[in-house]
Image: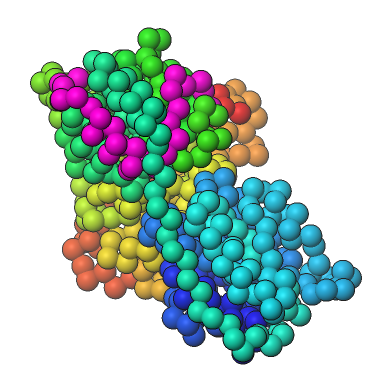
Amino acid sequence: MIVAELVGRALADLGVGHAFGVVGSGNFHVTNALRAAGVPYVAARHEGGAATMADAYARTSGRVGVVTLHQGCGLTNALTGITEAAKSRTPLLVLAADTGAGAVRSNFHIDQDALARAVGAVPERVHAPATALADVVRAYRTAVEQRRTVVLNLPLDVQAATAPDDAAQPAVAPLAPVRPGADAVAALAARVAAAQRPVFVAGRGARGAREELRELAAASGALLATSAVAAGLFADDEWSLGISGGFASPLAAELISGADLVVGWGCALNMWTMRHGALIGPDAAVVQVDLDADAIGAHRPVDLGVLGDVAATAADVRAALPGERTGYRTPEVAAAIAARVRWRSEPYADLTGPDGIDPRTLSTALDDLLPAERTVAVDSGNFMGYPSAYLRVPDAQGYCLTQGFQSIGLGLATAIGAACARPDRLAVAALGDGGALMAAAELETVVRLGLAMVVVVYDDRGYGAEVHHFTGEDHATVVFPDTDIAAIGRGYGFEAVTVNTPADLEAVSRWVTGPRTAPLLVHARIASDGGAWWLAEAFRGH
């Protein structure tokens, strides 16, 4: 057995969930070793897509994703996806072939350690046959225990060397949850007990703590909200406000800004989630609970920071909480949430006309037409709030937003990775025309894998964010002529429909009814909204 085979087998034994990649000579053997050991593998059409697929798979499944790459150019092609994963603290392993010792004049040679470090990933390396197993286990533990994206460099000469005969089967025991200190629990319990209008905002770090947070919220009378990346965590709770931040409905924003206590659970409380602080009332106390000490207070001052696992902290605070209280859960608030917490309940003047369908009309109709058991993956752009705010999701695994780096073009690969994690659900990829055309090669991947997917392209014939932000200026660089995106989809093997009016959505209804022999691409020519409400928030952060 050579070291490349040892690496693949060891990762399979450790329990990685799925691998994605583009195979070249440098990662050929390690990829086949993963496959031989039972790790499913998806061949992407571009390394950037492969990295984002692995990222989305990890976010949706809760298991470590793997991306496997050729040395040098394979790694640089994947860099945007790796950066997104690193910024989002996704437990991800990047198996990057590397030039061997003395190969500094190779066309493929670059400083891969420095490249990984530059984008926030952790560089690791298989140093020698004798250390290979320990190197792999170290990289895996860093990804899992520190929630980091790790680039594990695999030098070609080490890969090709004979592995030790006595290489043992690796095992990593899961760590116990980090419990908060008793003083911190008492302090948080006291603040919760004193609050009249508490709001809990759960982030990605709270995705395993749904029931503990719901129990504490019920006892304290708190309303529940999430950051965008944790959307769906409280989907079926009658006291849920949905997403806090730029995508929040008017009612959700009103209730959050009226809180006298805001607790961020595994949530950064950054400018997006708190609308640059506008969602925090002048007299509100702010508490942040996180596993990472560096995260507490990183984006705004907090009145209390609690270091600990979210589920463990919520359970401990509930045990310390004396009695139960009504808090924010009054009959009037309940009636308001039931009537208008969702954007689709807000009245609007329909813009459907010669330029296309109103994106609100489109999104509302799709929400009604598409099966409720869905995973929604959203790309970046002026359109992105419509699918995020209008398309319901069943739970926290039903929404995937790869926007830590704010790159467009990741949405389709995100949907593919999420679909591999949850093949029992319909994947809905919501894209702008710019991002869709950037990622078009992966349409072939969707068809080849036979994925149950609807790709919705919100086509405003340009880079809408820039069009609406730079009002009154020359837009020649950011607008484009009509493109028949439906025809592109058909060329890859999709069923496809162009939507200009609500009547055109009848084709979507027929596809949903079945037999669904191919994925569906909905090319929606959308009317201009004059600049979406979340767009101003985005540009305030630049």
Q: Quadrant of residue 48?
A: bottom right
Magenta residues, as a range?
299-327
Left or right of 157, for residue 421:
left
- x and y percentages locating residue 63 in the rendered image: 42, 62
Q: Quadrant of residue 103?
A: bottom right
- Is 362 rendered above or below residue 260? below
- Is 82 rendered above or below residue 441? above
Quadrant location of the N terminus in the rendered image: bottom right
Q: Nearer the viewer, residue 56 or 308?
A: 308
Query: Can residue 158 be seen in the rendering of this structure?
Result: yes
Q: Residue at x 15, y 25 (%)?
A: 324
Q: Quadrant of residue 493?
A: bottom left
Q: How did the renderer colour the structure?
A: rainbow
Q: Nearer the viewer, residue 251 or 93?
A: 93
Quadrant location of the C terminus in the rendered image: top right
- x and y percentages locating residue 187 in the rendered image: 36, 23
Total numbered labels = 0
Left or right of 69, for residue 275:
left
Q: Residue furthest front?
A: 182
Q: Residue at x 52, y 46 (%)?
A: 88
Whether the magenta-drawn stretch holds residue 319 is answered as: yes
Q: Residue at x 83, y 74 (%)?
A: 101
Query: Can residue 391 be seen in the rendering of this structure?
Result: no
- x and y percentages locating residue 417 in the rendered image: 44, 62
Whether the magenta-drawn stretch holds residue 384 is answered as: no
- x and y percentages locating residue 134 in the rendered image: 61, 70
Q: Residue furthest left?
A: 331
